[in-house]
């Protein structure tokens, strides 16, 4: 009997193993034979599961957590499907070949743009309840979760071929549908190979004993959020500070428990002010004088000069703080201030971040400075950023404020206070270091006062500013302590102090501004890389918004946001409305220039990718100059030899369309042996095209590949899409309205290796989709191709360039580094799975000669590498024109840059700042 039982048991195990194997084979066969892209008839997608979860999927969590969340959720923006790679139905032989190498789609949330923004926005939008920050900073056992999911998938596959394996994850506007005629299947994608985005074990579970300190903490750190912050902090100094703050808070030495309220009123006081057009045209007997605090960063100096020009008057004062990381802009503002006696630049600079305590510190120090300037008798403090612009004249503003000179204009959230505190994170302890706001745990709101908040853009009278800076009463001193460890403190500190102070009756719930809020686009947790929280940011105004400035029912004098690199026409319209504008035909009226590099910044301020491109653009310009000689080899007047790094680089726009780069560079004239400075204009070529003959599918309007995708403004901030082997490209598609459809996107490298392919469900209301496939780096340099297919029938094609690098760590690249960066990914595989079976189906031949040429090019250095780079760059960019900044160039055929319409040195009356007329003051 024991032997018989053993044989029966072994027989059952053998049958179970056989059934499991047949099950897997049957499912793969069904997937292959029944492949077709699915057009869904239903548009009901799941709602977004909170901005907190979206941010985590976007890359907020490090290591294994980031990979797990990326795998756990389809891309909410693009609806990318995650399922077994299907093969097209024709032909049968190819399908069978592909069936032997089943390919898996990866779902990977695109990484949000990394942009350190110095200008806070109101983080409490109208629909602020939809933002959930409850899951931020909570460590989980990611490795165990992955293993558990894998075991569940294996057991379910062995159990039955007809069961559905549902992969739980947040969705938005997209679904994974079963294939037609097959059993629905959803599988856990395998782990990437060693060479491709290997997930690291999350440091957020590291015990505090494993964290390196300068000195051991003075208490036991047990809070999960504090442990998470300590494990993610980059420097020992920051970790030490986090530990000290946590222990002081734990010992109740950090936060005030009770604060005195000095307001004589019960509840919130808010005075209503009226909009009177007629009264604002009259000149007050004693007009107020305003201290404009300009808080600027970036490189948009011409936009800032245009703002300054619109708000300038000799009666007012202008104090400018430039972010510590914006050295080019600081140099420009120092030059501006030297021209006007009532303009000064702060002698100190801070690196402020969105949501950081540093922003409040900057405001308080600026107010202290302004109060100490005895020669500046100002009455009101107004803060502005480079993204602000006036929508009323200075005279109207002065007339209005002169009537309400005892008031303070500040915008409150106007909602349930308990929910505001929760959504704003005021009941959480934060600390700023390593240019990051770390969430360290919970805290209690002090007793005795009412906490308020809203927008961090305000107009405060001098009396209240003096109270905030100089008072040592219990309210002011304790609120400074409390808000030193608060997220978005500038959005609440002044509100709370004002509402609880003796000045409470001067509060007007209106900051005299219009902000362009678009909840759908603006609440994307875009600052998760610098803040352990989710917030919102307003959009840029466009020309269609002009009526909003004229139809407002409340007093408004400023609007935000404006970006000339996104849309300058709306600023032109405002200028025409306020000041009459410039006459049509004025040089540079519809042009915009923005600096991206300046010689004083040093080549180390550029990435190797940008340095490579800018050098190549300069050489293209020299080739064009030599081409003007019409082939006369004996004439060297227009032949130049490049010298050194570029002098400056600007991006150039005309009529709000990107026109390319302007590269100013040195070169030696071969005829005169003199050093000259030239400027080359390069414009991008267009590669997007629809298939010929056209496909009946007509929803797609455009496709583009680039980096630094801004989902809020729906543009690539890398305007020229300059990419190198180590970059992570994003594929973007623009759609017209129509029925729900599913399309297939295919990425093809320069040697015709299919790097990635995935499906995107496009809902009827979708306008844009974007997706970053997790490709292994380095990407093979050369011209890549992206194809969009519908039912595996070609719809469109576009090409993009991955440029080989002539520089590595800002020095000419060595051969060993070139081989590493230009040889493509390890094993010539961009993902763990192979898409080779799709080559014959998509009619993409793999030519052995091209592969061998790519291998030879990967070893190039010096002039050989430069020739290869220039040949590739010339396929994508055109040297449109070259001009000379030298008064007498050896090449007489070159035009003077000042006489062109495109050069960065050509006239730009919009932003030029002549001395103001003595009579008008403007």
Image (tube, grey):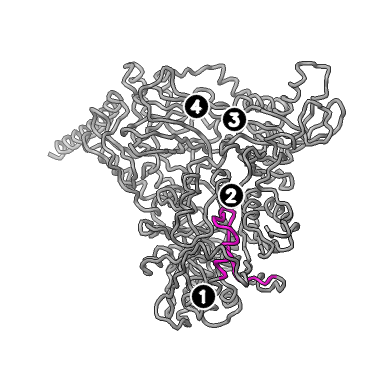
Residue assigned mark 3? 684
Circle 2 or circle 4, nearest the eye: 2
395 falls in the magenta region: yes
In the rendered structure, which disc, 1 or 3, sits on the residue that comes first in sequence? Answer: 1
Residue 676 location (% of width, % of height): 81, 34
Compared with 491, 26 (above or below) is above
Circle 2 or circle 3, nearest the eye: 2
In the rendered structure, which disc, 2 or 1, sits on the residue that comes first in sequence? Answer: 1
Tell me the distance, in whole angstroms, between the alpha carbons under discs 3 and 4: 12 Å
**Which residues are the magenta region?**
376-402
Which quadrant: the C terminus? bottom right
Residue 824 location (% of width, % of height): 55, 30
**Can you name the residue that lies furthest to the left here?**
1
| Tag shown at residue 575 | 2
- Depth check: give the residue in front, 647 or 3: 647
Instruction: Kindly state the secondary structure of the residue where label 4 is placed.
Output: loop
330 lies left or right of 425: right
Residue assigned mark 1? 479
Residue 331 location (% of width, % of height): 72, 53
Say if mark 4 contacts mark 1, CB within 8 Å.
no
Say if mark 2 contacts mark 1, CB within 8 Å.
no
- Depth check: give the residue in front, 264 or 802: 264
């Amino acid at each position: 009997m024991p032997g018989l039982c053993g044989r029966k048991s072994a027989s059952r195990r053998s049958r179970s193993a056989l059934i499991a194997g047949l099950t897997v084979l049957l499912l793969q066969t069904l997937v292959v034979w029944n492949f077709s892209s699915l057009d869904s008839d239903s548009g009901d997608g799941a709602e977004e599961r909170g901005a907190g979860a979206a941010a985590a999927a976007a890359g907020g969590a490090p290591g294994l957590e980031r990979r797990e969340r990326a795998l756990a959720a389809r891309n909410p923006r693009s609806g990318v499907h995650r399922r077994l790679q299907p093969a097209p139905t024709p032909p049968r032989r190819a399908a069978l070949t592909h069936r032997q190498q089943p390919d898996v789609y990866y779902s990977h949330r695109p990484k949000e743009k990394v942009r350190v923004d110095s200008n806070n926005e109101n983080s409490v939008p109208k629909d602020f309840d939809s933002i959930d920050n409850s899951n931020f900073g909570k460590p989980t056992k990611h490795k165990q979760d992955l293993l558990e999911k894998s075991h569940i998938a294996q057991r379910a596959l062995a159990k039955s071929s007809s069961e559905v394996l549902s992969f739980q994850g947040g969705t938005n506007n997209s679904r994974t549908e079963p294939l037609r005629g097959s059993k629905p299947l959803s599988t856990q994608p395998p782990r990437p190979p060693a060479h491709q985005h290997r997930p690291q074990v999350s440091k957020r579970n590291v015990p505090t004993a494993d964290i390196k300190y300068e000195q051991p903490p003075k208490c036991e750190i047990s809070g999960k959020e504090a442990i998470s912050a300590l494990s993610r902090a980059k420097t020992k100094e920051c970790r030490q500070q986090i530990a000290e703050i946590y222990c002081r808070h734990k010992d109740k030495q950090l936060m005030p428990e009770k604060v005195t309220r000095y307001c004589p009123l019960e509840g919130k006081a808010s005075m209503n002010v009226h909009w009177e057009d007629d009264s604002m045209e009259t000149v007050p007997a004693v007009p107020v004088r305003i201290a404009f605090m300009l808080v600027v960063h970036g490189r948009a100096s011409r936009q800032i000069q245009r703002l300054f020009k619109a708000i300038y008057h000799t009666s007012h004062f202008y104090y400018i703080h430039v972010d510590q990381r914006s050295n080019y802009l600081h140099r420009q503002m120092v030059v501006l201030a030297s021209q006007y006696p009532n303009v000064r630049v702060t002698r100190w600079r801070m690196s402020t971040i969105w949501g950081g305590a540093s922003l409040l510190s900057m405001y308080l120090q600026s107010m202290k400075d302004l109060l100490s300037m005895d020669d500046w008798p100002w009455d009101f403090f107004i803060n502005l950023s480079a993204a602000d612009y006036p929508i009323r004249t200075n005279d109207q503003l002065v007339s209005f404020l002169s009537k309400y000179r005892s008031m303070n204009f500040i915008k409150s959230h106007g909602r349930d206070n308990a929910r505001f505190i929760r959504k704003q994170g005021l009941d959480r302890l934060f600390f700023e270091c390593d240019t990051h706001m770390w969430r360290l745990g919970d805290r209690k709101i002090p007793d005795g006062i009412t906490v308020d908040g809203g927008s961090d853009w305000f107009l405060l009278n001098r009396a209240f500013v003096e109270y905030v800076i100089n008072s040592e009463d219990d309210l002011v001193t304790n609120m400074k302590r409390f808000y030193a460890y608060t997220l978005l403190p500038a959005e609440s500190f002044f509100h709370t102090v004002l509402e609880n102070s003796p000045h409470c009756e001067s509060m007007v719930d209106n900051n005299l501004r219009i902000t362009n809020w678009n909840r759908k686009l603006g609440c994307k947790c875009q600052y998760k890389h610098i803040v352990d929280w989710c917030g919102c940011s307003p959009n840029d105004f466009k020309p269609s918004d002009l009526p909003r400035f004229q139809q407002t029912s409340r007093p408004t004098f400023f609007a935000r946001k404006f970006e000339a690199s996104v849309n300058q026409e709306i600023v032109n319209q405002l200028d025409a409305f306020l000041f009459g504008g410039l006459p049509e035909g004025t040089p540079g009226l519809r042009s915009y220039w923005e600096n991206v590099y300046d010689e004083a910044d040093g080549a180390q301020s550029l990435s190797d990718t940008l340095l490579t491109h800018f050098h190549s653009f300069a050489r293209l310009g020299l080739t064009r100059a030599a081409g003007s000689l019409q082939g006369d080899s004996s004439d060297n007047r227009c032949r130049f030899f490049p010298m050194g790094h570029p002098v400056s680089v600007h991006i150039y726009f005309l009529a709000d369309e990107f026109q390319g780069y302007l590269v100013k560079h040195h070169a030696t004239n071969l005829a005169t042996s003199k050093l000259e400075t030239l400027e080359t204009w390069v414009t991008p070529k267009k590669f997007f095209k629809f298939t010929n003959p056209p496909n009946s599918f007509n929803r797609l309007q455009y496709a583009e590949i680039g980096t630094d995708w801004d989902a809020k403004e729906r543009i690539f901030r890398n305007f020229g899409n300059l990419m190198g082997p180590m970059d992570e490209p994003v594929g973007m598609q623009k759609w017209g309205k129509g029925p729900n459809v599913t399309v297939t996107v295919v990425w093809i490298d320069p040697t015709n290796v299919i790097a990635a392919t995935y499906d995107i469900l496009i809902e009827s209301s979708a306008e844009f989709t974007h997706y970053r496939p997790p490709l292994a780096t380095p990407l093979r340099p050369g011209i890549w191709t992206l194809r969009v297919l519908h039912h595996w029938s070609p719809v469109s094609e576009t090409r993009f360039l991955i440029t080989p690098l002539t520089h590595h760590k800002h020095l000419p690249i060595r051969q060993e580094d070139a081989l590493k960066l230009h040889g493509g990914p390890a094993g010539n595989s961009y993902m763990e799975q192979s898409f080779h079976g799709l080559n014959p189906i998509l009619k993409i031949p793999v030519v052995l000669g091209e592969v061998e040429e790519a291998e030879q090019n990967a070893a190039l250095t010096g002039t050989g590498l430069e020739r290869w780079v220039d040949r590739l760059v010339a396929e994508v960019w055109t040297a449109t024109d070259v001009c000379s900044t030298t008064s007498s160039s050896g090449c007489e055929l070159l035009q003077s840059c000042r006489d062109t319409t495109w050069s960065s040195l050509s006239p730009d009356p919009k932003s030029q700042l002549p001395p103001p007329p003595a009579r008008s003051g403007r």
